[in-house]
Amino acid sequence: MTLHRDELTDYLNDYLSVHQFSDYCPNGLQVEGKTDIRRLVTGVTASQRLIDEAIDRQADAILVHHGYFWKGESAALTGIKRNRLAALLAHNINLYAYHLPLDAHPEHGNNAQLARLMGWDVTGQIENSLVMLGKVEGEQTGASLREQLSQALEFEVLHIGESEDPIETIAWCTGAAQGFLQQAIDAGVDAFVSGEISEPTVHLARESGVHYFAAGHHATERGGPAALGLHLARRFGVSVEFIDLPIPV
C-alpha cells in the first residue's frame, strides 16, 4: 500500500501532539523526500549507519527519535552532517524525527514502552515533567532489578545503591534524564531508572538513598520508535521495519 507523505506528516504531528512541546529540535518531517511512501524504516538515531541500512532496503522514509538540527549546533552543512543529508537527498528519502513527543506518548512513547517491557504498574507522573511513577512487579531488590533490566534491555545496567535493599516504588524517564533524579527523590520513590549517568548523579543517589539505574540511552529508547512503527503498519498497511543498531552507552 502507498501512503502520501503529507498524510503521514499530518497524522504523526497530530497523533504525537507535537504542538504541545517546546523542544530542542524541530519535530516532524525534517528532510523532504519522495511523495509516495511504501516502505518505512524506524530506528533510534538517524546515524549514517541507519541511513545506509534504509538505502539497502529501498526505504522511502526513516522515522527516528533522534534527528537533526539541534538547538545550539552549527548551521553549517559540512562534514558528517553534510554526508548524512547528501545520502538522504540523493536517494529521495524522507526523514521524520520526534524527540520529546515520542518520549511522552502514553501508548507508544519510550517511557510507556519501558514500563510495558518491565511490567511496571504506572501510578502517575510527576507534574510538568516527563518522569513517570509506578510500582515494580513482584519482590525486587537493587540487585534483582538490575539483573531484570539488563536482561530485558540486553544492556549491562549500572546500579548505584545497596544490592539487597528492597525496591517497591519506582520513577523512570528514558534517555539522558539523569538530571531528573532530584524530582524522583522528592517524589519519595525507592528507585529511579534512566538511560545515562553523570558524575553528580552518583553522589546524589548515594546520599539520598534512592537507587539509580543507568540502563543505556539507546537501550531505553528503542521501545518508542519500534512501537510507533508497528502502529503505522497496522493503520496504513505500509511496510515497516525497526532496525536496531545498539551502542555501548
Image (cartoon, rainbow, N blue to C red):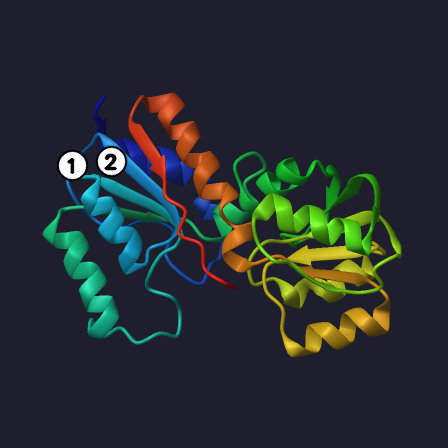
Residues 145 and 1: in front is 145
Q: Residue at x 70, y 72 (%)?
A: 201
Sequence-first tag of 1 and 2: 2
Q: For residue 209, which quarter of the picture?
A: bottom right
| Circle 1 residue | 35
* Residue 38, x across and y down, in percent: 22, 30
Q: CA distance from mark 1 to mark 2?
A: 8 Å
- Residue type at the position of mark 1: Thr
- The answer to whether one can see residue 10 in this image is yes
Q: Residue at x 36, y 26 (%)?
A: 233
Q: Tally the numbered discs.
A: 2
Q: Is residue 224 left or right of residue 210?
A: left
Q: For residue 235, which quarter of the picture?
A: top left
C-beta proximity under 8 Å, tags 1 and 2: yes
Residues 3 and 201: in front is 201
Q: Is residue 126 left or right of residue 150?
A: right
Q: Is residue 97 left or right of residue 119?
A: left
| 106 versus 84 height, above or below | above
| Circle 2 residue | 6
Identify the secondary structure beneath mark 2: helix
Q: Residue at x 14, y 46 (%)?
A: 92
- The answer to whether one can see residue 126 in this image is no
Residues 12 and 189: in front is 189
Quadrant containing the N terminus is top left
Q: Residue at x 38, y 48 (%)?
A: 64
Determine crowd level at label 2: few under 14, some 14-19, many 20+ residues with C-alpha closer than 10 A: few
Identify the secondary structure beneath mark 1: loop
